[in-house]
Amino acid sequence: MQKYQNLLVEEADNILFVTINRPTALNALNQQTMQELELLFGKDYADRNDLTGVLLTGAGDRAFVAGADIKEFIGVASSGSGKQMATRGQDIFFLIERFHRPVIALVNGFALGGGCELAMACHMRIAVETARFGQPEVNLGIIPGYGGTQRLNQLIGKGKAMELTLTGNMINAVEAHTLGLVNYCLPAGEARAKALEILATIGTKGPVAIAESIKAINAYYAGSDFAEEAEAFGRAASTADFMEGASAFVEKRKANFSGK
């Protein structure tokens, strides 16, 4: 039996390719999909130190993830368990944000509501030129609940985050790039190539240093910034990877990192 129903998972050259595969629903995030993301990032690949990174996208060419499953939302509202649903969604997206290897969102269409929140939980975002972003939850009388009010602030600043959240308006990929919501805005084929290029570059670096860098950068937004950076630096400096990297630099050769 296939382990994942709504995710297509492939691995090549130490890169994990994850596709949210609900194209007839514009890859909307239902609870089954959320459970599978939790399983993948929180258990199945949580200890895979041989990975270079993850490329996350949506099936088809219309949507990355067009939002959450509204029918499920209605059921949650009627049961009074909205807070629990939001907390669970946040916890699952924290697994992505804190994943020990870089997760790049290849945004290939609509990234709205929970889809925009999912993209923002990734470490980097590369958008195709036809991508669209937005937090339209106010149109339904609710607010972003999977981290959108926090990460949008972090990425584009308070004023613009207020505007997009309170109006529910969408922006195109060019504006998303201008605002700093995405790292690159490129034609479809070039966008994927750019993501793979970035992951290939990261794959040449020290794996321990990559993991510690992710922890330290995330720590800024948790309020422990400089203290966590010092701790992370200390952990990295005591590794065989550091000795190899420093020796390679002095000896003017390419480092051969072991991940230890």
Image (cartoon, rainbow, N blue to C red):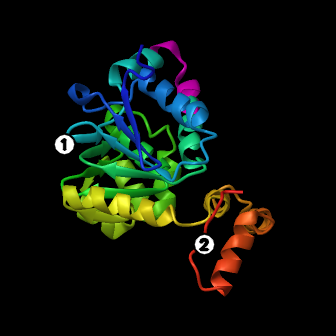
Q: 172 and 185: which one is in front?
A: 185
Residue 11 vs residue 187: left or right?
right
Residue 126 position, x and y percent, is 34, 58
Residue 104 position, x and y percent, is 42, 53
Total numbered badges shown on the rendered structure: 2
The residue indicated by pointer 1 is: 61
Check the picture and name the quadrant holding the N terminus: top left
- Using the rendered image of the protein, determine whether residue 105 is visible from the camera's viewpoint: yes
Question: Which region shows up in magenta?
Answer: 78-87
Q: 70 and 162: which one is in front?
A: 70
Residue type, label 1: Asp
Other-residue count near label 1 (Cα within 10 Å), few / some / many at <14 / 14–19 / ≥20:
some
Residue at horizontal 36%, vertical 25%? 6
- The relative height of residue 204 versus residue 246 in the rendered view (above or below) is above
- The relative height of residue 231 versus residue 109 in the rendered view (above or below) is below
Disc 2 + disc 1, Cβ < 8 Å: no
Residue 251 vs residue 90: left or right?
right
Q: 85 and 100: which one is in front?
A: 100
Q: Is residue 80 magenta?
A: yes
Badge 1 element: loop
The residue indicated by pointer 2 is: 255
Q: Is residue 144 magenta?
A: no
Residue 81 position, x and y percent, is 55, 20
Q: 43 and 203: which one is in front?
A: 203
Badge 2 element: loop
